[in-house]
Amino acid sequence: MYALVDCNNFYASVQRLFDPSLIGKPIIVLSNNDGCVIARSNEAKEIGIKMGAVFHQITETIIQYQVNVFSSNYPLLGDMSSRVMSMLSEFTPDFEIYSIDEAFLQFKGYEHFFDFYDIGKEIRRKIWKGLGIPVSVGIAPTKSLAKCANKFAKKYPELGGHVCVLDSQDKIDKALKKTEIGDVWGIGRRLTKRLKTIGVNTAYDFVKLNTLYIESEFGVVGKRLHRDLSGIPTIGPEEVKAKKIIANTRSFASHVTTKEELAERIATFAVTGSESLRKQKTCSNLIGVFLQTNPFRQDLPQYSPFLAFPTDFPTSSSLEIVKFALRALDKIYKPGYHYKKAGVMMMEITPEEIQQLNIFTEANPKHKALMKTIDAINQKVGKDKVLLGIQKFEKNKKWGMRQEYLSPCYTTRMSDIPILKLK
DNA sequence: TCTGGGGTCCTAGGACCC
DNA sequence: TCTGGGGTCCTAGGACCC
């Protein structure tokens, strides 16, 4: 059996955790740059704020309902996520982190010993007691059915106290019949539209389709999902693998026009990406850079170039990667445009220990030790303490990213730790 | 004024190899 | 009328996830 544990309105729940006065009030959390709504408390959902809504377009609603607004606080959210995951991992060794607020727990061979409903309740109780984060638990024989059960647990909390177990064909059928096709894991907007035109409106309708038909129309992806939803475990556990692409991209609060400013941002994206490469013990062989003007300003000239340079040898050295990134920037930069977004992508990622040597050039052996030292210092005394000369020294300016509603980093910064006052 | 960021997998078609 | 057989690798585009 698989359990899918999902934190309820995770970002909003975390903010509420450190400010109990927010309980029962509408909360929204914004994307980077305070652009879109990416998380909502139930109260915010009820007053009709949509996922992905553009923040500056809903100011009236915000004022009218006194909605509490937060910028994304990734240090805080990341830390709370790892605490949740750490507690969940104690329930079973077969444990898979699926996203920042979701994990699959697999229970092999326990079927006859455990009441899964009790397990679900216990998971919920522990996370709530230990961390104050509410979770929903869906338990079923396959991953896609566990996803389905989880949606049920969330949608009808009164039925099972945020726990839903699908342990018989009868229950599975009932749940599938009540699940809209668009809510099925792996069925996006396009497929929903296609399926509805052929009369498939629920997950149950989908399961009842002919296998051969599914394969010819929707390929192997459709076939896999079809089997998995039919109760035959097909979507197996995902191993944690090194990333194949590492991207670092940001929109700017206002536009950027000069090459100097872009160079400084590109360098920082490259440095951050290099750190990610080293963390997963890999090197990159192709460094790409892109620029983008603001696509919402069609009245301004548009220019969105991308260029990738192969490195001379596989590398994770910040110095090398910055060099190639800046070389690419130099090629694609054109004056006279208002750049709104930029990014660096590390591609063709290979393991550190497998090195295809180049005849003509080789890595500077000093870089490896240097990077190790820099990483160690930054780890010990705080992120970004050691920077390259081209990077911005001012702290807290974060590329002029708009973050007007940032909460304290309650769990990761000494000065932000909440203080309890006894009367 | 203002519109996120970061990933994965699959398929079809073309180029190329012997 | 007919035009071998069996492969690999790469790319662009499409779909999906959180």
Image: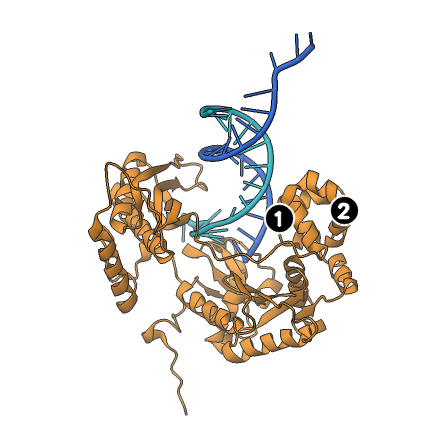
Chain colours: A orange, B cyan, C blue
Q: Residue at x 55, y 64 (%)?
A: A103
Q: Chain of mark 2?
A: A
Foreground pick, A395 / A186: A186
Q: Image quadrant of residue A170?
A: bottom right
Q: Image height check: is A256 above or below A100?
A: above
Q: Image height check: is A104 above or below A323?
A: below
Q: Residue at x 72, y 53 (%)?
A: A203
Q: Which residue is mark 1?
A: A188
Q: Residue at x 56, y 78 (%)?
A: A126
Q: Chain of mark 1?
A: A
Mark sitting earlier along the chain (1/2): 1
Which amino acid type is shown beneath numbered disc 1?
Gly
Mark 2 neighbour class, 10 Å CA radius: few under 14, some 14 to 19, many 20 or more: few
Tell me if A166 is positioned left or right of A130 in this view.
right
Which amino acid type is shown beneath numbered disc 2?
Leu
Q: Image height check: is A12 above or below A115?
A: above
Tell me if A380 is positioned left or right of A195 in this view.
left
Residue A286 on image: x %, y %: 35, 41
How many discs appear? 2
Q: Which residue is mark 2?
A: A209
Foreground pick, A246 / A294: A246
Quarter of the rendering occupied by the C terminus of chain A = bottom left
Asked if the residue at tag 2 contacts the one at tag 1, i.e. Cβ–Cβ closer than 8 Å, the answer is no
Foreground pick, A233 / A275: A233
Residue A332 on image: x %, y %: 32, 35
